[in-house]
């Protein structure tokens, strides 16, 4: 007897597009068997993680029979101290994507807000209210689109401005009385661009109080030293309707552990805590995050690696007439003439053992994202690039010559 799920799962779930991750090292090795693999697709820390993390995780395993601290107290206190906020202003989650899921499940359900000024969080569910609405940029983190889609929210995607930069004015213009949330990934994924401080201030001041402001700072650490990058945390005291998202998956090298956190008004954090899975993240993940936080030397080493790799990458592409978007993140976006070119390039590089991220799911089918790697990985990218582009050029010349001969 077959189980008919068609009338049990909401239509919007059946019709939505789920997140499709890039290929793993194991998949590429099994399919192509290249001599070397450089995984430059997922914006992980290619340097790895702090040696202190391994020690802390091994120690945490001695109590693995126990549930983890549901409040992540020790980690919250350390994060609060470093960010100059009260521990009650922090919610620790299983990665910042889990935080996005929590936010969408909390705010993007059909709701009727009882207090438009956000001073009270009392809300009443109503099936008659229709779809919740959110605003964000068009070419931004696909995880937000997925989680908002789960809630069947109506998401207004504002086109990027020239240079793949945010159009803050257009985002403000897209806000309606029905808008529940506005989401800004700053620095942005996948473009590596950002909203500078002066534009951010105008953008922030233009958002009405009834809208939840979500600033995703997953790549915050890479903005260190960028003079006009906005310090959004300084505005939290004046904007109780703003939340900041952070992660340990990028600069701290803990993507496999899934640890992130939210910073915001304690009342808001308290509401979100009701929706969070009780025992996330795991005890090992909490121990890993705490150890990573305390190894600032490794963090600086990781940031230096990215800066050096970016400079090398820019010089290499410029020498080969490649097109890219300047980035302050740990990845750089390459721009091709068409979706076909981007697809062919990515697949050809994959055969050489270089895993890159095509950006069709992000609304940029003609673009490819390249994570900045170790010197060895960047060298492998360069060698493979020259081989692949040489072969593609030869094929193009052959096709052109064949077409010319047929026309003679």
Image: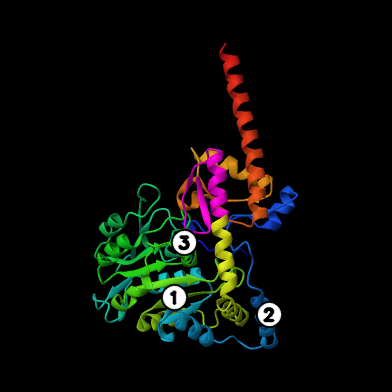
Mark 1 to mark 2 CA distance (whole Å): 26 Å
SS class, disc 3: helix
Mark 1 sits on what residue?
Answer: 262
Decide which of 266, 372 is in the foreground and name it.
Answer: 372
Q: Name the image quarter holding residue 289.
A: bottom right
Q: Nearer the viewer, mark 1 or mark 2?
A: 2
Task: State the residue at coordinates (29%, 66%).
Answer: 204
SS class, disc 1: strand
- x and y, in percent, of residue 317 in the image: 55, 43
Indicate which disc, 2 or 3, sits on the residue closer to the N terminus: 2
- x and y, in percent, of residue 28 in the image: 69, 52
Range of residues picked out in magenta: 309-334
Task: State the residue at coordinates (50%, 83%).
Answer: 78
> Looking at the picture, does residue 227 appear above or below residue 404?
below
Indicate which disc, 3 or 1, sits on the residue closer to the N terminus: 3
Q: The C terminus appears in which quarter of the rendering?
A: top right
Q: Nearer the viewer, mark 3 or mark 1?
A: 1
Task: State the residue at coordinates (64%, 76%).
Answer: 53
Q: Is residue 322 magenta?
A: yes
Label 1: few (<14), some (14–19) or many (≥20) C-alpha neighbours in 10 Å:
many
Q: Is residue 312 magenta?
A: yes
Mark 3 sits on what residue?
Answer: 146
Q: Nearer the viewer, mark 2 or mark 3?
A: 2
Mark 2 sits on what residue?
Answer: 55
Indicate which disc, 1 or 2, sits on the residue closer to the N terminus: 2
- x and y, in percent, of residue 139 in the image: 42, 53
Decide which of 25, 46 is in the foreground and name it.
Answer: 46
- x and y, in percent, of residue 336 in the image: 50, 40
């Amino acid at each position: 007897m077959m189980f008919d799920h068609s009338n049990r799962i909401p239509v919007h779930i059946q019709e939505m597009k789920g997140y499709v991750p890039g290929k793993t090292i194991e998949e590429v090795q099994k399919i192509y068997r290249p001599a070397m693999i450089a995984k430059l697709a997922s914006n992980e820390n290619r340097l790895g993680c702090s040696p202190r993390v391994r020690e802390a995780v091994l120690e945490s395993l001695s109590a693995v029979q126990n549930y983890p601290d549901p409040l992540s107290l020790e980690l919250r206190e350390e994060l609060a101290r470093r960010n100059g906020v009260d521990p009650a202003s922090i919610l620790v989650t299983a990665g910042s994507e889990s935080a996005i899921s929590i936010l969408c499940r909390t705010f993007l359900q059909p709701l009727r807000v009882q207090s438009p000024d956000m001073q009270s969080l009392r809300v009443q569910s109503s099936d008659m209210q229709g779809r919740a609405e959110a605003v964000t940029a068009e070419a931004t983190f696909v995880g937000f689109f997925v989680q908002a889609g789960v809630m069947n929210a109506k998401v207004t995607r504002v086109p990027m401005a020239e240079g793949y930069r945010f159009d803050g004015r257009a985002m403000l213009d897209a806000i309606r009385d029905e808008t529940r949330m506005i989401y800004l990934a700053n620095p942005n994924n996948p473009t590596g661009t950002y909203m500078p401080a002066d534009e951010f201030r105008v953008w922030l001041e233009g958002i009405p109080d009834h809208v939840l402001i979500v600033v995703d700072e997953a790549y915050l650490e890479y903005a260190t030293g960028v003079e006009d990058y906005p310090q959004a945390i300084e505005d939290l005291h004046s904007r109780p309707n703003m939340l900041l998202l952070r992660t340990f998956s990028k600069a701290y090298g803990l993507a496999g552990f899934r640890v992130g956190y939210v910073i915001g008004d304690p009342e808001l954090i308290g509401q979100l805590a009701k929706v969070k899975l009780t025992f996330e993240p795991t005890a090992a993940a909490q121990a890993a995050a705490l150890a990573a936080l305390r190894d600032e030397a490794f963090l600086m080493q990781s940031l230096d690696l990215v800066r050096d790799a970016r400079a090398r990458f820019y010089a290499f592409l410029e020498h080969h007439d490649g097109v890219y978007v300047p980035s302050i993140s740990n990845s750089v976006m390459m721009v091709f003439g068409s979706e076909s070119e981007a697809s062919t390039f990515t697949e050809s590089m994959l055969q050489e053992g270089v895993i890159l991220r095509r950006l069709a799911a992000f609304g940029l089918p003609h673009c490819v994202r390249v994570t900045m790697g170790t010197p060895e990985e960047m060298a492998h990218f360069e060698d493979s690039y020259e081989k692949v582009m040489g072969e593609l050029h030869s094929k193009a010349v052959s096709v052109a010559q064949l077409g010319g001969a047929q026309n003679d």
